[in-house]
Image: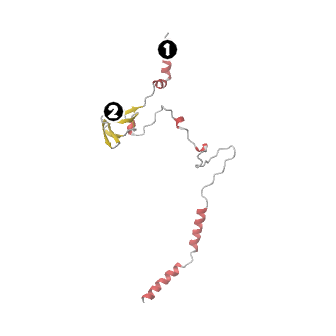
């Protein structure tokens, strides 16, 4: 009885697997054709005398690939840059040195300002300067200061004109 039941169940399953799946094969061929078709439009070469709209990213020597202006042209050396961290917004006069922790060669300094304690390392920017050295008793911060000639030249024109006028009046 069991072999007959097993054969009765197996025969319909095997017959179902041997059906012709023309619709599945047609769909598979359609997907293959779509995958083989190029989806990105190819850039046309520019005519002589016209600027090319498309520049290959792999052509590293093409000057048209560079679209930004050099940093030196955008900003002068004395221009202020926006603060990058909370520590750069602090006034150095309001900061109090708390201490330091040393773990092997790594040294971290701790500063207190506005009720918060901040961790700093050598080279980190704080206020208008940069942390140069962290000692057990103090922290050395080097500030960037404009030369006096640049500070005077950035004064308003009327102040400079008034200074020149007073010099001319004196014998």
For label 1, the crowd category at 10 Å Cα-Cα, with few meaning under 14, some 14 to 19 and many 20 or more, is few
Q: CA distance from mark 1 to mark 2?
A: 40 Å
For label 2, the crowd category at 10 Å Cα-Cα, with few meaning under 14, some 14 to 19 and many 20 or more, is few
First-in-chain label (1 vs 2)? 2
Dot 1 falls on a residue whose secondary structure is helix
Q: Nearer the viewer, residue 123 or 152?
A: 123
| CB within 8 Å, label 1 to label 2 | no
Residue 2, x across and y down, in percent: 42, 88
Residue, x 47% and y 83% (percent of image)?
10
In the rendered image, which quarter is residue 24 located in? bottom right
Reading the image, the residue beneath label 1 is 167
Q: In the image, is 70 to the left or to the right of 122?
A: right
Q: Nearer the viewer, residue 101 or 128?
A: 101
Reading the image, the residue beneath label 2 is 94
Residue 152, x across and y down, in percent: 47, 23
Q: Is residue 48 above or below residue 138?
A: below
Residue 161, x across and y down, in percent: 50, 19
What residue occupies the far front of the structure in this picture? 104
Q: Which quadrant of the figure contains the N terminus? A: bottom left
What residue occupies the far bottom of the structure in this picture? 1
């Amino acid at each position: 009885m069991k072999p007959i039941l097993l054969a009765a169940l197996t025969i319909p399953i095997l017959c179902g697997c041997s059906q012709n799946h023309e619709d599945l094969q047609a769909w598979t061929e359609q997907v293959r054709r779509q995958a083989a078709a190029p989806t990105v439009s190819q850039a046309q070469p520019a005519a002589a005398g016209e600027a090319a709209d498309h520049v290959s990213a792999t052509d590293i020597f093409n000057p048209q690939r560079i679209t930004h202006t050099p940093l030196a042209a955008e900003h002068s050396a004395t221009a202020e840059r926006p603060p990058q961290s909370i520590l750069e917004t602090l006034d150095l006069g309001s900061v109090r040195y708390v201490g330091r922790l040393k773990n092997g060669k790594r040294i971290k300094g701790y500063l207190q300002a506005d009720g918060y304690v901040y961790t700093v390392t050598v080279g980190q920017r704080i206020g208008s300067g940069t942390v140069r050295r962290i000692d057990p008793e103090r922290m050395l911060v080097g500030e960037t200061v404009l030369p006096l000639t640049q500070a005077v030249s950035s004064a308003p024109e009327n102040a400079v004109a008034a200074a020149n006028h007073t010099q001319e009046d004196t014998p």
